[in-house]
Amino acid sequence: MPVSEPSNASLPESDETSQRNTCPEAGGSPRPTPTRTVEVPCDLCGRTSFEVIATRDRHGRPLQTALCRCCGLVRHAELPSEQELAAFYAKEYRLRYHDEWTPSARRVMRAWKNAARIHRQLQPFLPATDRQRRSLLDVGSGIGCLPKLFEQTGWDAHGIEPNEGFQAYGKTRLRAPVERADLQSMPTELRWDVVTLVHVIEHLRSPRAALADIHRRLQSDGLLYVECPNLAAPHAVRSRLFHYAHIFNFTPVTLTWLARSVGFEPVMRFGHPDDANLQMLFKRSEPQRVGFDDRGYRTTIDALLRAQPRHYYARPFYWYSRCRKLLAYAWEHLTANTFVQRLERRLADPPEPGSLGPSAARAA
Ligand SMILES: [Zn+2]
């Protein structure tokens, strides 16, 4: 669906006082829920006054999740350090969440098909340019299916992934252009045509810092594609929503506000409004100061209040998507091994010289 931009999501304000005046908290309708002051300010609006909306994660372990009373952004009340996150994603994340050091055939098949879907849906928006080669950087690339697909269609595509086992599998078995690296370690003189963040932004300590970094690394007309869980989608039970790896939980409103404040204009939102994931395409623009009306807070609160099993399971879309998912799982069980064997054989042919890495991404 084309993105219809919120009418008052870009009100320029010049200072902290002005922002406070546009914050719904200043209007004063505090909810009777526990509040706390967080140590690290809100990544979207910069405020520190949060409501505590959960004290345990989906497995019942202690984890305090909080809602910004100004803009409606949801995140962990206490953020892990960059060092803790780097260690977690290098070795622990895939083992703890997927019980895998290297990906199973089903995971490879699913990743390849997801990448093919993203590759397909981005085609109408990709730059038709006279540059010698178009370039793509996939941040948090997993086994590197997305850069591999772009590479196969002539792009100078490159993936970066912190996890050792998944990156090694993609590099060796799929010959994917994926390296163990993070965004900060990439050369700053390269300018990319497209950057993709597929189920990555919610894992970061500061999505704002990452988007600002990407903004500097994109061509002036570059594109940013973001896919992440949608907190505003229907959910059955609120207590199942939150867990350690997802530091942030975005709605369409908070993701759009964050992107605009960093300098990205929304171009397209893909998929159904009830999809569990946001799929949004942005174009590089100029940073805008956002006026925070009550839609951010209200959208989040409404989503949390709607999280009731009776409503969730009564929706036709639930049964439609559930049936599709069950059929897909059954198909994966039956065909994944053969699919991956054929995929690995097909990709075993050596790529053309010079097609790996960001070598052809234009220097600034
Ligand atoms: Zn906020």
Image: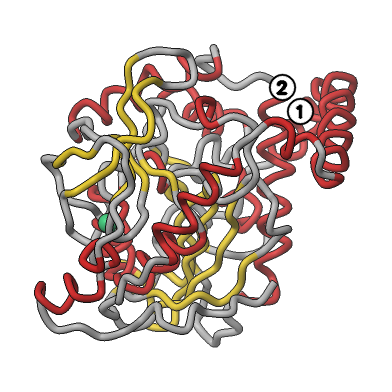
Q: Badge 1: few (under 14), some or many (20 or more) residues near its Cα, within 10 Å?
A: many
At 35% from the left and 52% from the top, the residue drawn is 73
Residue beneath disc 1: 340
Are the residues at dot 2 and dot 1 in contact (C-beta closer than 8 Å)? Answer: yes
At 18% from the left and 32% from the top, the residue drawn is 81
The mark found on residue 72 in the picture is none
At 80% from the left and 20% from the top, the residue drawn is 337
At label 1, the amino acid type is Val
Secondary structure type for disc 2: helix
At 42% from the left and 49% from the top, the residue drawn is 139
Name the foreground residue: 211 vs 103.
Answer: 211
Q: Is 227 displayed left or right of 263 in the figure?
A: right
Name the foreground residue: 51 vs 134.
Answer: 51
Q: In front: mark 2 or mark 1?
A: 2
Instruction: Classify residue 329 by image quadrant.
Output: top right
Percent coordinates x, y for residue 333 in the rendering: 84, 19
Name the foreground residue: 334 vs 7.
Answer: 7
The earlier-in-sequence mark between 2 and 1 is 2
Q: What scheme was used to colour the molecule?
A: secondary structure
Residue beneath disc 2: 105
- Name the quarter where the N terminus is drawn: bottom right
Compared with residue 178, is residue 193 higher up or lower down, i.e. above or below? below
Q: Is residue 56 visible?
A: yes
Instruction: Classify residue 25 by image quadrant.
Output: bottom left
Q: CA distance from mark 2 to mark 1?
A: 6 Å
Quadrant of picture, ligand 1? bottom left
Name the foreground residue: 249 vs 17.
Answer: 17
